[in-house]
Amino acid sequence: MSQYLLALDQGTTGSTALLIDRSLRVIGKVNREFAQKYPQPGWVGHDPEAIWQSCLDAMAALLAETGVQGSEIAGIGITNQRETTVVWQRSDGQPIADAIVWQCRRTAAICDQLKAAGHEQRVRQLTGLPIDAYFSGTKVAWLLDNVPGARARAEAGELAFGTIDSFLVHRLSGGAVHVTDPSNASRTMLYDIGERAWSSELCQLLRVPQGMLPQVAPSAAVYGVTRGVPGLPDGIPLAGMAGDQQAALCGQLCLEPGMAKCTYGTGAFLLMQTGSVRVESRHGLLTTVAWQVGDEFCYALEGAVFIAGAAVQWLRDGLGIIEKASEIEALALQVPSSDGVVIVPALVGLGAPHWRQDARGLIAGLTRGTTRAHLARAALEGIALSCADLLDAMENDLGQRLAELRVDGGASANNLLMQIQADLLQCRVVRPQVTETTALGAAILAGVGIGWFASLADAQTAWRQERTFLPGPEQETRELKRLWRVAVAKA
């Protein structure tokens, strides 16, 4: 009897396979890393075949470790690093070049030309996105212009484009399916999020033949079945997909407008569900698609803090004040406050709502009495203050106060950081029992796709909190916020 869902979480540095049962309990988890490629400064690439092999290896190891048979898998859900771009041959599924990773800046000059030509307002109007090398559209154009013969082959219908979700479904289905979902399509700079369709206007602007693009299907649906996948039987439904941050929003069961989650990793990604209303940000946030389930089409506001956990890594590797990242909480707890020390972790500039590429990291308020513990606490406060700025912007855009922030990611295990976040936001911060929320979201979508759940709301009973952090008195953070605003202005 089929009793498990297999979630594939294909990330930037590795691929994770998880088995999840009908109660959405994680039965097993295996991760396999793959090589990163940095051919030139600012360029980042992946070998699509290495990505595929990492997925196969993770799935095989997972089944071996859990003793689960492939015949017991009821469906497969996929979540993925967004924006990373693959172009492959329709005839045999072979990529024509390395994937261009979301981090890659090789198309920055193309973006500058588009902005100089006055296209940014129109692109944002259609896509909810600024013109930036982050997104897939200019990456596709670059491959067509720089791989010999690629543009002519694409125009002749011989080549296919996809983000990683699309590439994996193509491989898992034995080449039978070329599909994506709206959450991933909305990150390409080629998808009209109002019309909910590929934009011929944007395809023409970015010089991408529309025939290369995958079909856009709901985030929860049966797209096809496995065929010829080593270690898996044929016929397992491929039934759900979403970009990683949207999948985490789903995994946190943020199903009502105004609900929000923050994933604390190297950076921090914040998404707030806005329901069927497409909210245009006045603070530089992205308007994106959360998911489509049946006829329900949900939008979200998104913002990123570029440096979150990376600030702790910097304290470890750059300043040497800790030996392991896990030491920072105990060190910071040695002092009751940061004693006026402020760290602005703008090590790679400031994102929304500030949007200052020229900003630099800053430490302010040092005295002879400043210790390692003060710096540790100020670093945690800097992460939480950066997120608070972003969530303040979201509240202003949506016109309502946040009641609860659901958190996940590695740094969410830091209790002091979560308490500081609750104090700054003046709302409760809730950490779930299952912190693999990205994979969980993919599994929930697959569960809806195969009919285990009638809707996303049917999965809500499986979400359980592990700990809630309640805010302290607001006046205790006022001076910290004032010092932060002064320091950010100087960064």
Image: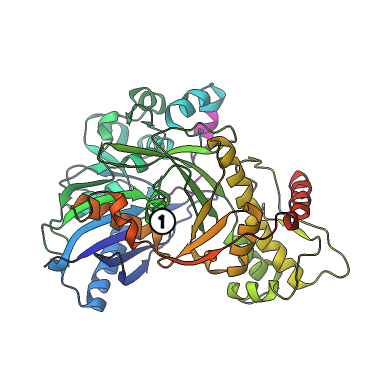
Q: Residues within 10 Å of mark 1 (few under 14, many from 20)?
A: many
Tell me if residue 53 is in the magenta stretch. Answer: no
Q: Name the residue under label 1.
A: 252
Does residue 348 appear in this view? no
Q: Where is residue 108 in the image (x, y as percent from the top left)?
A: 53, 38
Apparent side of residue 194 relative to residue 392 in the rendered image (left or right)? left
Q: In which quarter of the image is residue 51?
A: bottom left
Q: For the N terminus, give its image quadrant.
A: bottom left
Q: How is the image coloured?
A: rainbow
- Pick the residue in front: 46 or 19: 19
Does residue 5 appear in this view? yes
Q: Position of residue 163 (x, y in %)?
A: 34, 45
Mark 1 is on which residue type?
Gln
Q: Write the residue at 65% across / 42% down.
A: 357
Q: What stretch is highlighted in magenta?
A: 101-113
Apparent side of residue 220 relative to residue 261 in the rendered image (left or right)? left
- Pick the residue in front: 472 or 37: 472
Considering every residue shown, the one lying at the far right of the view is 368
Q: Where is residue 269 in the image (x, y as percent from the top left)?
A: 51, 51
Q: In which quarter of the image is residue 219?
A: top left
Q: Where is residue 42 in the image (x, y as percent from the top left)?
A: 54, 48
How many marks on residues?
Answer: 1
Which structural element holds mark 1? loop
Apparent side of residue 74 relative to residue 37 in the rendered image (left or right)? left
- Pick the residue in front: 376 or 350: 376
Q: Write the residue at 78% across / 52% down.
A: 483
- Pick the residue in front: 290 or 347: 290
Tell me if residue 102 is in the magenta stretch. Answer: yes
